[in-house]
Image (cartoon, rainbow, N blue to C red):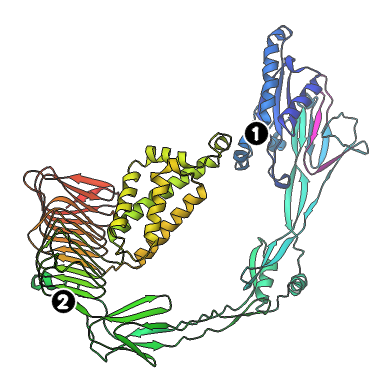
């Protein structure tokens, strides 16, 4: 049985070469792939394909027809397979040896050079090729990269030749030279010039000694020599060509030219412009409501009903001073062009009711509460007088809407509404009413079946609804956009009919609560239309109605969908900008009510029954919470939760906050982030939070 090791640039080439050498057909051999080819940059770390061809016995030929067909078919897919795993081969830096008829080429000095072992073999020693003719084998040579083989005075053009003792063989190695690559670029802001350099090199080669074998591949050892050809003068000439004349760093250029690794070097640096500062108004009075709870460590002496103090000014008092802008300084680019400093803006003060502007001063023109609103370089100032209503708010008085503070001496009765741009202070009960204030709501008695919101010009619950709808609409848009860009959709009958059907389908499958949330939003906008600041809210409600509730009558496009989402985001951003984080609701008791605040909510009395509370600040209840749901963005503190009959009461905070409960009864549900805990029996002294492993802990 004859065995032959064949090498080639590819597996197919190695097989063809072996068959040609053995003068056999593919069905007469069994093929074993020992090593696949590997490509390298400039031939570095590349390797040839190696296969073993084993001649089959004559009586086996008939059995090899199917094998030959299999090998042929396999070879058709072999190159594709190599492409798929080529990246893996690139990461394989090992030089694998293979077994078979190949001899370890590193052991040249230890081989026995007797006549028997050298018959039919070829080898290299000290740069010279040696050949021994043989009866069974005809020695051959594969010519590796970077080598010229001269046979009998002629340069061998083929990569593979047979040789014999009488041949005169000479080896010449090829020296390669890679020039230095470099370029100079200017940054987009014209403040830096960069020299990117990749030093050139010379590859010198020496022929490796090779052990005697029947088929030998000539190999070389490569030696790299740095060949830096870029000069200082060439760099200066390039800088001159690019008009780079300012901030040149000569020492960095020298460092770059001496670097063996190369890289990116900043060889010129301009001077950026120095920014000035806009004008502003220096506020001379207190404008925020002070909180004695936050300032006083001894909480036992605090009267929670009187914890907030509203600042006031007197007529003639200076509210603020106007400060002039300070201009910046110009800079220079690396091409010596002037970079102008950003223009500074003076503050624009709009003096509204209760204030006057005298030279550089804003002065109170009447007694009341100072109010300052800043938006960019525009400042609005006014003094809000307080409205005092001596009796009840009922059908006789009508609704109360006032830009300043509102004080109600009596009750607020069923169906009535109070809307204030400042604070609302109610001395008696609130029943079946709606109260909205921008700053603070204090109710010194009980709240029954009422809707209380505080914190901005737009109802906080309306903001929460809009944020929910916007988030789901963005998720739906991403799904639809992925569908409509697919080839399958473009070729379908739905391509020309808009996205209405897709919206309906995705809404029913993935966003089942979206319809009810949109309806709630539209209903709330309709009910509060008179109190809303912008007509855009009503326009958006109509768009959402057409988009999600009347799809059968509307041919929607993806562009229209995106525009509606952008409108939602803009309105939400504007409304949140108007929110007041220092806002608060302070009540004694509440029953069957809804309380929303962009700041804190405090219940100072004995009970909070079947009430929904949502606060972007802290929620504190000094008495019992029984039924309903409480959410506190910055934490919750409750004295007692639930009842002995297992009344369901839900207490929720985000994952970064904690819940403190002095006593919790069966039916209490504690939620922190996406983790929750059901209280099965009475517990005291609960301090709930998430640990580092995102597990809910009770202490």
Q: Is 280 situated above or below 698? A: below
For this orientation, the residue located farthest to the right is: 153
- Please provide the residue range marked out in magenta: 131-150
Residue drawn at x 73%, y 45% as measured from the top left: 221
Q: Spatial distance from mark 1 to mark 2, Cα to Cα? A: 87 Å
- Tag 1's secondary structure? helix
- The answer to whether 474 appears left or right of 587 in the picture is right
Residue 100 visible to an observer of this rendering: no
Q: Is residue 144 magenta?
A: yes
Residue 658 percent coordinates (x, y) = 22, 56
Query: Depth check: 485 or 268 in front?
Result: 485
Tag of residue 233 = none
Q: Disc 1 marks which residue?
A: 82
Say left or right for 199 vs 653: right
Question: Which of the two residues, 297 or 60, is positioned nearer the viewer here?
Answer: 297
Q: Which residue lies at the image location 46% right of the left edge and 41% below the top edge? A: 500
Residue at (16%, 50%) from the top-left corner?
A: 628
**Nearer to me, 199 or 397:** 397
In the image, residue 583 above or below residue 61? below
Q: Which residue is mark 2?
A: 388
Q: Is residue 634 magenta?
A: no
- The percent position of residue 186, horizontal first and vertical second, equals 66, 69
Give the vertical position of 626 relative to 128 (above or below). below
Which class describes the residues within 10 Å of circle 2: few (<14), some (14-19), or many (20+)? few
């Amino acid at each position: 049985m004859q065995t032959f090791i064949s090498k080639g640039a590819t597996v197919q080439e190695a097989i063809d070469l072996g068959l040609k050498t053995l003068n056999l057909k593919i069905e007469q051999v069994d093929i074993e792939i020992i090593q696949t080819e590997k490509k390298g940059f400039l031939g570095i770390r590349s390797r040839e394909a190696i296969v073993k061809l084993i001649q089959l016995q004559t009586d086996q030929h008939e059995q090899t027809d199917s094998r030959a067909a299999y090998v042929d078919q396999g070879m058709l897919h072999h190159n594709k397979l190599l492409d798929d795993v080529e990246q893996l081969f690139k990461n394989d830096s090992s030089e694998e040896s293979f077994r078979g008829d190949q001899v370890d080429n590193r052991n040249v000095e230890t081989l026995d050079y007797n006549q028997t072992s050298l018959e039919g073999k070829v080898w290299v020693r000290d740069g010279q090729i040696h050949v021994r003719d043989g009866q069974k084998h005809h020695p051959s040579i594969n010519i590796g990269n970077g080598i010229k083989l001269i046979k009998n005075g002629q340069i061998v053009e083929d990569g593979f030749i047979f040789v014999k003792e009488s041949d005169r063989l000479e080896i010449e190695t090829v020296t390669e030279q890679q020039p230095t690559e470099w370029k100079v670029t200017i940054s987009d802001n014209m403040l830096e010039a960069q020299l990117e350099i990749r030093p050139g090199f010379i590859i010198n080669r020496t022929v490796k000694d090779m052990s005697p074998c029947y088929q030998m591949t000539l190999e070389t050892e490569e030696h790299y020599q740095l060949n830096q050809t870029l000069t200082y003068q060439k760099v200066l000439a390039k800088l001159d060509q690019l008009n780079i004349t300012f901030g040149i760093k000569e020492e960095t250029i020298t460092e770059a030219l001496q670097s063996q690794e190369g890289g990116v070097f900043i060889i010129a640096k301009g001077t950026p412009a120095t920014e000035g500062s806009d004008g502003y108004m220096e506020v001379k009075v207190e404008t925020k409501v002070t909180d004695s709870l936050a300032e006083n460590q001894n909480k036992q002496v605090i009267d929670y009903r009187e914890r907030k103090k509203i600042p006031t000014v007197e007529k003639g008092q200076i509210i603020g001073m106007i400060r002039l802008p300070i201009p910046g300084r110009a800079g220079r680019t690396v091409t010596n062009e002037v970079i102008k400093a950003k223009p500074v803006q003076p503050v624009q003060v709009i003096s509204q009711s209760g204030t006057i502007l005298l030279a550089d001063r804003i002065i109170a023109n009447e007694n009341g509460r100072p109010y300052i609103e800043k938006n960019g370089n525009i400042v609005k100032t006014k003094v809000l007088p307080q409205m005092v209503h001596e009796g009840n708010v009922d059908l006789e008085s009508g609704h109360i809407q006032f830009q300043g503070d509102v004080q109600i001496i009596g009750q607020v009765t069923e169906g009535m509404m109070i809307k204030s741009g400042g604070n609302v202070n109610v001395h008696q009960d609130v029943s079946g009413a709606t109260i909205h204030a921008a700053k603070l709501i204090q109710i010194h008695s009980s709240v029954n079946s009422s809707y209380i919101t505080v914190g901005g010009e737009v109802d906080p619950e309306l903001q929460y609804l809009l944020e929910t709808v916007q988030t789901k609409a963005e998720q739906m848009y991403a799904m639809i956009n992925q569908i409509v860009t697919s080839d399958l959709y473009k070729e379908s009958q739905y391509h020309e009919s808009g996205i209405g059907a897709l919206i309906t389908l995705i809404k029913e499958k993935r966003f089942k609560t979206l319809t009810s949330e949109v309806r709630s939003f539209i209903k709330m906008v309709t009910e509060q239309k008179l109190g809303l600041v912008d007509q855009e809210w009503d326009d958006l409600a109509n768009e959402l109605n057409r988009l999600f509730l009347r799809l059968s009558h509307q041919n929607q496009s993806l562009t229209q969908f995106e525009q509606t989402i952008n409108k939602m985001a803009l309105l939400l951003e504007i409304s949140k900008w108007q929110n007041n984080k220092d806002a608060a609701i302070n009540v004694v008791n509440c029953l069957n009510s809804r309380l929303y605040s962009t700041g804190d909510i405090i219940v100072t009395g004995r009970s909070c029954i079947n009430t929904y509370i949502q606060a972007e600040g802290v929620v504190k209840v000094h008495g019992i919470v029984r039924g309903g749901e409480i959410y506190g963005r910055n934490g919750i503190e409750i004295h007692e939760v639930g009842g002995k009959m297992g009344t369901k009461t839900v207490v929720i905070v985000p994952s970064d906050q904690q819940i403190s409960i002095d006593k919790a009864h069966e039916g209490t549900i504690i939620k922190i982030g996406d983790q929750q805990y059901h209280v099965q029996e009475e517990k005291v002294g609960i301090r709930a939070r998430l640990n580092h492993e995102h597990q809910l802990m009770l202490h």
